[in-house]
Amino acid sequence: MHKNWIPLQSLPVGGKTFVLDDQAQWQEPFDEFGLNCRIIEPLRAEIFVLAQEQGVLFRGTIHGKVVLPCDRCADDSEVFIKHSFDSFEPYPAGSFMASGKDTSRASAGRKDPEHGNSEDDAELLDDADEAVIRSGAHGRGIEINPAALAWEEFSLTLPIKPLCRDDCKGLCPVCGSNKNTDACSCKKEQGDPRLAALRGLTIEKK
């Protein structure tokens, strides 16, 4: 992801659409973040990028299909990705806008005697996602990383607890067999095992 920075000044005035369909580029963050995910239908993101006065507009879609381990039995759980998103990333504090106007925190927070102050604008500038937009080193100006945004949006589409099927029975806690496919003769534990010593206790009423 760190190799995908693009100078904002290189974009046409009317914006540009980026297509991310290199599967190796998608696999890179899987490996980097240790995500047990396998692509079975190519992932493809199309992201339209447009520089605006206060920041950059990203509008895109992501399609494809991946496999994650089921949360209950660890078998394959297929996840179809069909996601649309809009994201606005403000210019980083202390940077200059593409138009050449100063967007530093000092300028954004300056009070105007007739129109009040713009402290809210300063807070907005502080909200810039550093993985997606940054001030380039050595005077390169604003740089953007559409691939990083695509990864963030893709991550949001993944289920917290993927299931191979809604009625997945999971694994036997005793022998570890898959209860969806294997018969298991293990005795089912009754109640909290920490209270086992009290199960035979009887109380006589007086």
Image (cartoon, rainbow, N blue to C red):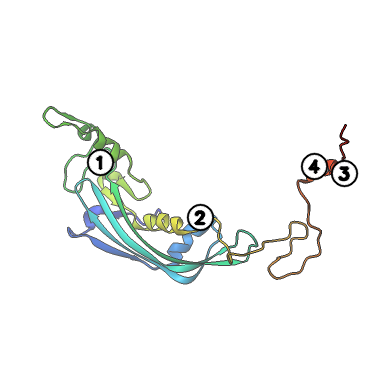
Q: Of label 1 and label 2, which has the lower sequence position?
A: 2
Q: Position of residue 108 (x, y in %)?
A: 22, 35
Image side of residue 25 versus residue 31, left or right: left
Viewer-nearest of discs 3 and 2: 3
Which residue in the structure is indicated by mark 2?
32
Q: Which element type, helix, strand or loop, lies under badge 3? A: loop
Q: How far apart are marks 3 and 1 (CA)?
A: 73 Å
Image side of residue 42 versus residue 121, left or right: right
Question: At 87% from the left edge and 40% from the top edge, which residue is drawn?
Answer: 201
Which residue in the structure is indicated by mark 1?
95
Q: Where is residue 161 in the image (x, y as percent from the top left)?
A: 56, 57
Circle 2: is it few (<14), some (14-19), or many (20+) Cα within 10 Å? few
Q: How far apart are marks 1 and 2 (CA)?
A: 29 Å
Q: How far apart are marks 2 and 4 (CA)?
A: 44 Å
Evaluate if marks 2 and 4 touch, with contact meaning CB atoms under 8 Å apart. no
Q: Distance between the residues labelled 1 and 4?
A: 63 Å
Q: What numbered label is drawn on residue 195?
A: 4
Q: Which element type, helix, strand or loop, lies under badge 1? A: loop
Question: At 26% from the left edge and 37% from the top edge, which residue is drawn?
Answer: 94
Q: Say if 104 sits above or below 68 in the image.
A: above
Q: Where is residue 45 in the image (x, y as percent from the top left)?
A: 37, 65
Q: Indicate the quadrant containing the C terminus: top left, top right, bottom left or bottom right.
A: top right
Nearest the viewer among 154 and 180 is 180
